[in-house]
Amino acid sequence: MMRSEARRAQARTSEMFARAGIVLSAEEQSQIEVAGFGLGNLEEQGLELITYVNTDRYCAKELVLFPRQTCPEHLHPSVHGEPGKMETFRCRWGCVYLYVEGEKTTEIQAIVPAGSESCYTVFHEIVLHPGEQHTIPPGTKHWFQGGPEGAIVSEFSSTSRDEFDIFTDPKIARMPVIVEDEEH
Amino acid sequence: MMRSEARRAQARTSEMFARAGIVLSAEEQSQIEVAGFGLGNLEEQGLELITYVNTDRYCAKELVLFPRQTCPEHLHPSVHGEPGKMETFRCRWGCVYLYVEGEKTTEIQAIVPAGSESCYTVFHEIVLHPGEQHTIPPGTKHWFQGGPEGAIVSEFSSTSRDEFDIFTDPKIARMPVIVEDEEH
């Protein structure tokens, strides 16, 4: 990802937080993570987030999805004998379409990213509006997409170890860094 | 606490959430906890809260303090061999004065509840405005008070077991129920 693209995404994320009345410190503003997952189309498949706290006991983040932006399908495996990450998504603003393992929803509201259809395999739909939440058990495949206006989602969870996440798309090898050099 | 007093506090809490742009479901609105700690003066010593999620791995709550309302000094002890609750307070709206163990702050901004002075013993002051947060280690005495306009504080933590909390004030024997009968 170009540094300029990441900076634009950070600024857009800050605007969405401001619109939703969610206040970040100046330091946090500069630490907003922009995850393109190495797929080259951030606005289609990507995620913006700030980690408030991540201890060996719990974690809290604020996730931002631009309109129709998709966080690709993945799961949180057991790590060092501990159960995988368990997480609760609480919609704060906008609307998020969440897909988990279970009975397939007949007509889903999300648009599966074109060209990546084979990397999306679970289609049990849960739609979250502000004030609604859903808890995802460890080891469960899931993916999610922002609605027409995007979404802000609080994530409450056990300890976060993103580097162990297993993505369905084999092109996603690792969580990308926040901002890469312009020449990359 | 009279049922009518608890209902009024719930309504006031709902108004503060609305003013801060924090959305609760209708079910959550009806489940707002009003904790008077059995001290008989809710507006002076009390706390309003909603628990979003409390699993055996993590917990997330939204705490509300009315102007100058104080959550009395307490600590979270080890339970069943596990370390006590660790918690991160993140101010979302208003201002909160937090006191923890450590060097005493010379002139604190909170007003210690009159008549309960002996039940407040730690005075290391941390002032949190929106976007600011502080993590309280297990087993650490702490108390906190809403600023002149009150406060809304997100609490991210390990599993919450309120019934084991140890309060400095011996008159506080247990966490009170949400709403007691009118005749109590």
Image: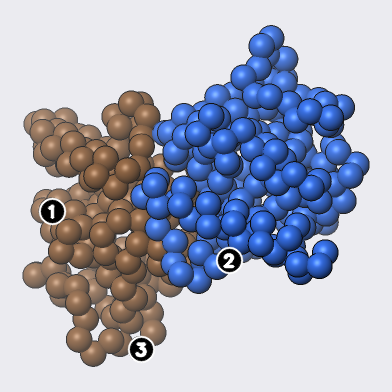
Chain colours: A brown, B blue
Residue drawn at (39%, 47%), measured in percent from left and top?
B19
The first of marks 3 and 1 along the sequence is: 1
Q: Nearer the observer, disc 2 or disc 1?
A: 2
Residue drawn at (21%, 81%), measured in percent from left and top?
A108
- The three-letter amino acid code for the residue at tag 3 is Glu
Left or right position of A178 against B79: left
Q: Chain of mark 1?
A: A
Q: Nearer the viewer, residue A19 or A102?
A: A19
Q: Is residue A84 above or below residue B106?
A: below
Residue A171 visible at all: no
Q: At numbered mark 3, what does the secondary structure look like: helix, strand or loop?
A: loop
- The three-letter amino acid code for the residue at tag 1 is Glu
* Disc sitting over residue A102 in the figure: none
Q: Chain of mark 2?
A: B
* Quarter that holds the N terminus of chain A: top left
Left or right position of A112 against B25: left
Residue drawn at (28%, 43%), measured in percent from left and top?
A17
Residue drawn at (64%, 38%), measured in percent from left and top?
B69
The alpha-carbon separation of the residues under discs 3 and 2 comes to 31 Å
* Co-location on one chain, circles 2 and 1: no
Q: Is residue A70 above or below residue B19?
A: below
* Disc sitting over residue B31 in the figure: 2
The alpha-carbon separation of the residues under discs 2 and 1 comes to 38 Å
The residue most toward the top is B106
Residue under pointer 1:
A43
* Disc sitting over residue A103 in the figure: 3
* Co-location on one chain, circles 3 and 2: no
Q: Nearer the observer, disc 3 or disc 2?
A: 2
